[in-house]
Amino acid sequence: MLHKKGCIPTYLAALIGASFAFPALSNPVQGLEAGAEDVERVEVIGARQAYRGNFSTLETPQSELVISSDVLIDAGAFDLSQALDLSSSVARQNNFGGLWNSFAVRGFVGDENLPSNYLVNGFNAGRGFGGARDLSGIESVEVLKGPRAAIFGRGEPGGTINLVTKRPTFDKEGNIRVLAGSFDTYRVDLDYTTPISDDIAVRFVGYYEDAESFRDTIETKRRAMSPSIAWQIDDKSQLVYELEYSRQEVPFDRGVIAIDGVLGLIPESRFLGEPGEGPMEADVLGHQLEYQHDFNDNWSALVGVNYRDTSLEGSATETGFGDVIDGEINRFRRTRDYDATYQVFRAELTGEFELAGLAHRLIVGIDSDEFENDQVFLRVRGDQFINVFNPVYGAYPLPTPGPNTDRVETQESLGVFIQDQISITDKLDIRIGARFDDYEQELINRRSDTTATQTESRVSPQFGIVYQTTDTLSLYAAYGENFRPLSGNDADGNGFEPNQSSSMEAGIKFTLNDGNLTGTVALFRVEQENLLVVDDPTAFTSAAIGEAESQGIEIDLNGEIGDGLMLWASYSYVDAQTENAFFDANFGFTVEAGSPLLNIPEHQLSLQLVKESELSGRPFEYGGGVVYVGDRNGFFGTDFELPSYTLARAFVNYEISESLSVRGELENLFDETYYLNSFADVWVQPGAPRNFRVSATYRF
């Protein structure tokens, strides 16, 4: 499908012919292999992420949180949702039966019928149907808070998640990890990088996982690989290609139900679907190509192209929205065949110069993307009852679903952006930026044989100011506007005006302990309009009539607080609610103004302490963490709530030798019953009881 509309060949031609060059990689090439004495060593060009520029933490007038690979390992995070639990600004949302990542940043989530978008090395990558994102090939997770439309383009108003991948280095090294845990969980990870010549290095990252679950009858299989190759063309230029492949087989699991609004009347292990359906299958095949170059010490540029193909298919029987009568609830059966492609091109120039006696740091660029979302959705309702207290699977023949949705939607955009951070004095900087987006949407309804198109142009401005009072403390404030295109159609078959938002934030950034400990305290307020609400659930149409706001405070503190003692702390207070009343046809009632937004806790905390020590002369690491999530609305527009929960975990890690280490982890230490998220009182995702993992890692 690379030939679609000529986009990829055009981009590659532009890439080959361009004289742009890229800023440095997230894992930049680090020189030639030691021991090649007759070859000049290639030095690092410098490390800078795409769209980010060369700014220290204290110089950046926005709140950002970078979760490194060490922190992810210590937290026992294997997928993106677990990683984002480390940021209190991010709240879990309905994860579509475990088949995708869905999250809200600062109270706001995207389209409930699509996964939450995220970036991979600056490329849009999260809106497809490839299953929950595993962290096997990820070096770090960046939580970039606040509106980022002025640089990244259309996106979520609360913030942007960017994943930085593991890339080749010229240091030959590798490791293999073997893991076993509760619920018959088995996993193998491999990570190996090596030079294959004086200027070319490769890396292979992959995993295989086979696991049952605390949920009855649920078993999953996941596998992925991420090979990459880096070419150090000369001491100023690099070319990197990355491939992403994954396949997941995951049963569709809507979770448990609250009977008459009460949770816990059935076990958290109770599965209410049909095991005979088999798993849903989610696949990803993606490519990223980046070329970077430094013209000199002050100017650099990049060109990049990305193509990602995802699919989700399978059938599932799900509980409906009716009441439990005599112990039974009705269900419906649905079949999904979803395909999505995402292709992105970008080019960016960054540099530093002086003008009129003022120092400028400039980012200017152009990008374009095309997202194609092809959905075939079948459904059948009827007498498919199940007894929630004594389920009998396979009691009914599986009915054949009939047509419901058959459509393909294409979103295309072209954006031009500029950002200039001007040093007014040695201590005072201002940031001014804007982005112009030209956007086109086409929605083809194959059932009704109709086509609707619309075009939009948007300017997204940003303003920021940062004052560095000392070498260890700065004050900042920022304002930005954001827009996000909306998928789907209204009752007349037309598309929607984009979701619009504005955001303000102000805060303090500081470093302590000789720069080893960094912190941010931020106040924020976000306002949104044109939020989608269900207009006709039978026709699968919506209306863009919702308004909402979010405000709160965030505190992030992480780094070394003592000799070998590492702290990670993140706390947030978020007040997120609707601003207008509207009728929700999905459930047949009016959502009043001032209603809390779904799955958004007012208070959330993530805390982790890790101690590095020695045992019998060998490195020994131990620690633990606590996650607290407050009460949340569990059924939008009603008073149904998910209760608060506090989870504790602990781990130990011991290096038996320079090449072998062992690790033990215990999750949910106090075996708390808890619920992660919900869509309504009949679709509630329970959390796992106390469980353990043991693993061994061999380095070579």
Image: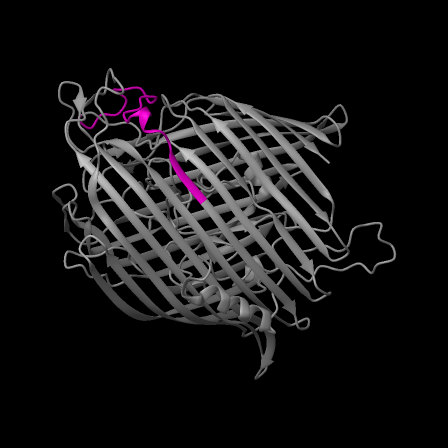
Answer yes or no: is residue 481 visible: no
Image quadrant where one finds the C terminus: top right
Residue 135: x percent and y percent? Answer: 52, 41
Q: Is the magenta stretch mostly helix, strand or loop?
A: loop
Residue 541: x percent and y percent? Answer: 19, 52
At horizontal 80% and vertical 58% (from top left) the residue drawn is: 41
Residue 20: x percent and y percent? Answer: 59, 72
Residue 390: x percent and y percent? Answer: 24, 15
262, 201: nearer the viewer: 201
130 w.r.t. 509: above or below: above
147 w.r.t. 283: above or below: below
* Magenta-highlighted residues: 260-283
Image quadrant where one finds the N terminus: bottom left
At horizontal 75% and vertical 32% (from top left) the residue drawn is: 658
Answer yes or no: is residue 646 visible: yes
Q: In this view, does 186 lie to the left or right of 25?
A: left
